Amino acid sequence: MAVLTKNQIKAGHWYQPDGTPAHRMVTNDGAGERVTTIKDAKRLGLYPSVTSILGILAKPGLETWKLNQVALATLRAPRQENEGEAFWCNRVRNTAFEQVELAADLGTMIHGALEAAMAGNDFDPAMAVYVDPVLAWKRETGILIVEREIRLVNTAHGFAGTADVMFRYGDNGIGILDYKTRKTEPGKPVGAYEDQAMQLAAYAATYWGEENVGRVLAANVFISTTEPGRMEVVKHANPERDWQAFKMVAGVWRYVKGYDPRPATRAA
């Protein structure tokens, strides 16, 4: 007997020109919602998120991991009698990435707790093991948070997104932080990926200005989900280089998608 499962394929994120999220649209019959498509974006002049733009980059290591998960999932979800091939393939994919969904749920809870804690508000005590090390680090460094969860729209380069933390430090230092949950292994260092460096550079250039991106302290705060209490801060060495790289990726995204959301281009 077939087993009904939901499709876990994720859609891209879109924003209105004022920064309002537009990830979903009302269905034609008004009875529900659906994911926003590139067709909707072209019609409404929406901006793609930074992560959507970076999604066009090839990630060989990630792709190999995905293939391995699908292969293993065929053992956990064998094909059933009279089950169609397309339905079974979809069920296997969903089975393969159930752990990703569970990890995302924990990541969302940790992120929400961090946001509340940084604002001086109460948070779920069960999240303290993840949050307390970050708060301790903040006190030790003496950074001054300027804004949190700030929605950014870059009309000049055609993208948008939401940044976790903008901060100042010392006499004239400026910076950006982004929280990431990560599965870690004891004794193994945590490193950031190139797309994470570009993501922060794009936000930094938008918020602090392109002319200042070279002096921005950009860092990912990695919170371990497999070693509760472990937190590591990874700084990116060259935000200016990362910003230049992101702009090239954004240009490729516009070419591949056949859509340029920049107002100057749309008006031409």
Image (cartoon, rainbow, N blue to C red):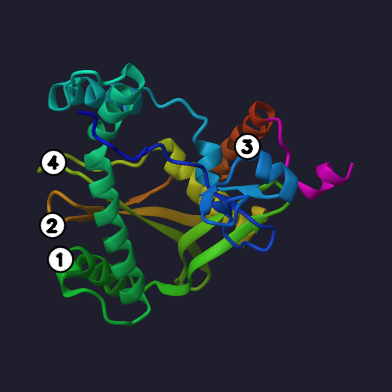
How far across and how far down the image is residue 85, in percent? Answer: 32, 17
Residue type of the residue flagged with mark 2: Pro
Question: Could you tell me how far apart the alpha carbons at marks 4 and 3 are, in whole angstroms?
Answer: 34 Å
Q: Is residue 199 left or right of residue 213?
A: left
How far across and how far down the image is residue 204, in percent? Answer: 55, 56
Camera-side residue: 248 or 72? 72
Disc number placed over residue 250 in the picture, else none: 3
Question: Could you tell me how far apart the alpha carbons at marks 2 and 3 are, in whole angstroms?
Answer: 36 Å
Dot 3 surroundings within 10 Å: few (below 14), some, or many (20 or more)?
many
Would residue 213 be seen by someone viewing this image from the given angle? no
Residue type of the residue flagged with mark 3: Ala
Tag 1 residue: 129
Give the residues drawn in magenta, as a range.
Answer: 258-268
Query: Helix, strand, or loop for circle 1?
Result: helix
In this rendering, the answer to whether 244 lies above or below 232 is above
At 23% from the left edge and 67% from the top edge, which residue is drawn?
Answer: 131
Disc number placed over residue 228 in the picture, else none: 2
Would residue 122 be seen by someone viewing this image from the given angle? yes
Mark 2 vs 1: CB contact within 8 A: yes
Mark 2 vs 3: CB contact within 8 A: no
Q: Quadrant of residue 151?
A: bottom right
Q: Quick one: label 1 or label 4, which is nearer the N terminus? A: 1
